[in-house]
Image (tube, rainbow, N blue to C red):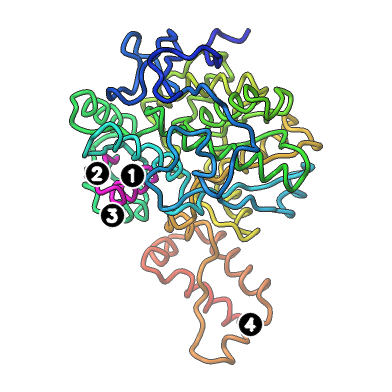
Amino acid sequence: MVPTMADLQLTDDVPPVADDGVWLACIECGETFAPFDEIRYTCDHCDGLLEVRYDDLPTFDEFEGSGVWRYNAALPFEKGVTLPEGDTPLHEVPRLKEDIGVDALRVKHEGMNPTGSFKDRGMTVGVRVAQEVGVDRLACASTGNTSAALAAYGARGGMETLVLLPAGKVAAGKIAQASLHRARILEVDGNFDECLDIVQDLAARGEAYLLNSLNPFRLEGQKTIGLEIMEEFYADNGEYPDRIVLPVGNAGNTAALYKCFRELVKAGAITEEQVPKLTGVQAEGAAPMVEAIENGYEDTRRWEDVETRATAIRIGNPVNAPKALPGIRETGGTAVAVSDEEITEAQRDIAGEGVGVEPASAASVAGLRKLRREGEVDSDESVVCLTTGHLLKDPEAAAEAGNEPEPVANSTEAVLDLIEEPSSVTGTIRRQASKAADAPLVPALVASGLGVAYLYRKFRSKE
């Protein structure tokens, strides 16, 4: 039995508090609020999550221009604090399509946004709202991408930025971005969820404007991912995708896409039958959404201890679960957990198509492969996998997943000698490295950077 859930029904009734046709509505008790008269993130009465609502929902014919602000008819403003963002590629991946065994497969690469992740879509709207309500300090908790985006858009808007990160748990590339954009970076001795607890407390005390996805305006920018997918896929295929598979951390994108589709149905732009199945993927070490779907929970249960190499989704308490769980269930989707090894394999496979993504992004392809293998996804389905961040967000993980450099002497002849039989030479080196991993001397050699060179010389000497 599917549990009772939040009321996400869109209404025709425009409340008196609406400002130019825009208002906030609580998804739990239905209370409505003016959008910009006060700073609020949750309902004043029941602390439920808020959604941005509109009196006039557009169809595809009303959009013009490019990027996120092409869709301003579906957003609170004509234009935001922009770099610009959006208009990301929808890649064809023919070898992956054949390997996984679906009718059509595309990869929506959100890593091609200005700071390298989908977070830019939310920040272009969120920072604009911060200007509207008159704040001068922005804050977020982050596994990395949110901090990079907030720092960049805060700098663009001329605002102070404070980011709280779990110490030792954020990829260096992401910290570097926030640092260069002059954010104040605080490394907290705790996990992401504990960082978010602190940021929420700061926001409640009026010390900063919170721009995590608990902020309903963040999700307005992120819903443009869905608008782009629907337009681009239809233009190429003459139909909408059957399924969208996406990584899940705080579940903001899942919630945002479901809102996008509800608004399109309400506007008459698509039918309910044309709504893609929303399918969430989490790492096995951080999978509260999967647990909730598999057990029929109304909400997620907080995981205190989470761990995965996919740092962007290392989250144990997805704050948008009350919006996202109905999105998965009502669209006929599902959720699945994948291992770190499956994520790394998918990251390599996506890279084999020339598309470079960070580990969390690859979870979508890993999840699709697992669901196809288990028969949950049919061979005749058309699928879009959302990848959320660029590979250079986590260069260390990319290096670990990729090929090892091969040492060679300083001469053309040595290079030719090495590459004339690349599959046998390189393959043998890697096989020997793998087989010798437990040998007592090899770990020390690898740790000192000599392992590959040692194995290569050993192999060549035998020839």
To which residue does mark 1 refer? 150
Q: Gap in Å between the C-alphas at discs 4 and 3? A: 53 Å
Quadrant for the C terminus in the image:
bottom right
User: In the rendered image of this protein, does residue 328 appear above or below residue 132?
Assistant: above
To which residue does mark 3 refer? 181
Q: Gap in Å between the C-alphas at discs 1 and 2? A: 7 Å
| 96 sits left or right of 185 in the view | right
Q: Secondary structure at mark 2?
A: strand
Query: What residue type is disc 4 on?
Result: Glu
Pointers 4 and 3 in contact (C-beta within 8 Å): no
Numbered label attached to residue 463: 4
Q: Position of residue 227 (x, y in %)?
A: 60, 38
For marks 1 and 2 on the same chain, the one whose residue lies earlier in the sequence: 1
For marks 2 and 4 on the same chain, the one whose residue lies earlier in the sequence: 2
Measuring 28% from the left and 57% from the top, which residue is drawn there? 180
Q: Residue furthest front?
A: 20
Q: Gap in Å between the C-alphas at discs 2 and 4? A: 59 Å
For marks 4 and 3 on the same chain, the one whose residue lies earlier in the sequence: 3
To which residue does mark 2 refer? 161
The residue stretch that appears in magenta? 145-165
Q: Secondary structure at mark 1?
A: helix
